[in-house]
Each structure stands twice: as structure tokens, then as C-alpha cells.
Image (tube, helix red, strand yellow):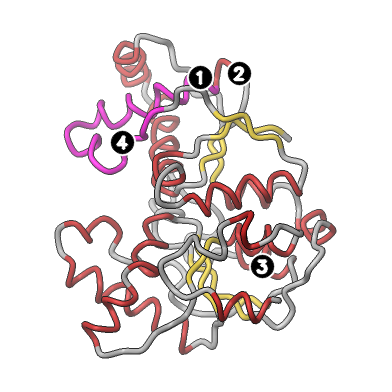
Amino acid sequence: MRYAYFPGCSLHSMETAYDRSVKAVSKHLGIELWEIPDWVCCGASSAHSVGHLVGLAIPAKTLVKAEKEGLDVLAPCAACWQRMVWVNHEVNTSPKMKEKISKAIEEEIKGTSKIFSIIDGLAAVGMEKISHAVKKPLKGLKVASYYGCYYVKPPKVAHIDDPENPQLMDEMMKAIGAEAVDWPFKTECCGTSLIFQDLDTTLAMSKKVIEMAVKSGADVIVTACPVCEMNLDMRMAQINKRFKTSFHIPVVYFTELMAYAMGSTPQEIGLDKGHCGETKSLLAKIS
């Protein structure tokens, strides 16, 4: 299995633990990642707000390179994945928009490369193969799989799994020996990029997610979205201060737990120092 790999800005800056763990898991499972050369930002943070065509043309510039290589795309970042999915949707449903995008990037885009999130990209390997790759089963670890809203909405265009009750991350956590906690907030929004405009609302929304995970008995929250990880992990201290709470639950990427279970060390994947919040309790439990 070979993918055109699009890490995006987050994985090459603050979220290096995500990038390292994705590459580690891929290696353990025999997946080859061809990083798209000279990729550019998908524009999720700003480009689509200044014009629909601009918001499509920016990711299309990178996507067309994968098409030329004849590869499907693996995009770990939820925002990057969704922007590329929207490009394919427009290209394959509107000949007029396809022409406009091609003209904007001065290359023909065909919409032939499928866009995989890291969740369905890894799940495609099969749970049996994932289980066979495990060297250190995470027995006794209770995991709350947090999908957030980007991976499930809008369900007619950009979604993976069941939009109301997705299970793929849960199944992968079970495959590495952990216990997947059944909880009702797995697709609730954390506030996403509203953090830049309305801190109070974002903190309140993220607080509800963390609180429900704790009430559900989880030892750790795992996610696949950089914005979700940052809002829950980086902002936890602010949430505690604002709401007089005392949350200390670790928030990590699900690929970090997978890589660790398959034999990678915490240092190799950034599980030891790749987060703002506490991970010592998590490492103590899984060790």
C-alpha cells in the first residue's frame, strides 16, 4: 500500500508528534508514504474565507501532483483532508468549477486521486493486520476516541464512518489491546478555530468534551485532529483556571498509542515531550 502523503502545516510545526507517529505506524504496517514534493498549505485557516475558488485552488495545486503520480492521498490533518475532499467533490460534480480550478492553478485537475483521512487510511489495512503488528498490547487502558466534527460533517460530502456514532478509531484502539470507552461526545465540536475570535466560547465547548470523557472513565483522550488536540491539550490549564476544574487527563493522537503498541519508543514518536499536558501518567500506565 502506497499513499501520497500530505502532512500539512500543523504536522511540520507544533504537531510533530503526530507526523512522527503517523510515519512510525505506517512503517510498522508496511505502508509506504511518498511525501508530496513542494506541497503548500491547504488554506483551511484563511483562504476559503476570502473566496470559494481560492479555497479550492490552493489545495488543488498540491492535489494535482498526487494525481500525476497515480496515488491516492493520505492527509492526517482533519482540516487538510476536508479541504481536499471538497476539491474532489467540486471537480467531479461541476465541470464549470473544474475548469475554473484548472485555470487558476494553470494545470488540469482530474479528481482521480481518492482522499483518505488517517483514520480510514489506516483502517483500510484491516484490524487483523493491526493486531498482528502489536508487540505491547495496551491492556487495561480506557480510551475515549474523539473524532470531532470535521471528520463527520457534512455527511453527504466529507465524512468517514457513521456520522453520528463513528467506530473506526474505537476498533483500532481495541485492535491494539485497549478498551474503547463508550461515550456520547465523540463528535461534539471543541470550538475549532473559534478560539481566535471567542476564547470564552471555545473554552466552554472544550471543557464539556473533557468533562464527559472523564465522567465516562477514560484514562486518555485520543484524536486525529490537530485543532482538537490543541484545544483540549494546550487549553486544559486555561479551562481549569476559568471553570475551577482540575482536569489532568492526557490528550494524544491515536497514532501515538498505535505506534507505541507496535514497538516504537515514546521518544521516537514524541509521546514523552510532544504535548503541553501531562503524559507521565499515561506512560506509567501503558508501561
- Categorize mark 1 by other alpha carbons within 10 Å: few (<14), some (14-19), many (20+): some
Is residue 92 left or right of 197 when viewed as pictured? Answer: right
State the CA–CA distance, disc 3 to disc 4.
31 Å
- Residue 57 horizontal/vertical position (percent): 32, 24
* Contact flag, marks 3 and 1 (Cβ < 8 Å): no
State the CA–CA distance, disc 3 to disc 1.
33 Å
The residue identified by callout 3 is 173
Q: Which mark is residue 251?
A: none
State the CA–CA distance, disc 1 to disc 4.
17 Å
- Categorize mark 4 by other alpha carbons within 10 Å: few (<14), some (14-19), many (20+): many
Q: Tag 4's secondary structure?
A: loop
Q: Residue at x 60, y 65 (%)?
A: 167
Is residue 85 left or right of 254 when viewed as pictured? Answer: left
- Residue 275 horizontal/vertical position (percent): 45, 64
* Contact flag, marks 2 and 1 (Cβ < 8 Å): yes
- Residue 86 horizontal/vertical position (percent): 39, 36
The majority secondary structure of the magenta stretch comes to: helix
The residue identified by callout 4 is 43
Pointer 3 or 2: first along the chain: 2
Q: Which mark is residue 65?
A: 1
Where residue 72 sits, quadrant-wise, is top right
Is residue 231 left or right of 177 when viewed as pictured? Answer: left
Quadrant into which the N terminus falls: top right
State the CA–CA distance, disc 2 to disc 1.
6 Å
Numbered circles on residues, count: 4
The residue identified by callout 2 is 69
State the CA–CA distance, disc 4 to disc 2.
23 Å
Q: Residue at x 41, y 67 (%)?
A: 276
Q: Furthest residue to the right?
A: 132
Pointer 4 or 2: first along the chain: 4
Looking at the rendered structure, the kind of residue marked 2 is Glu
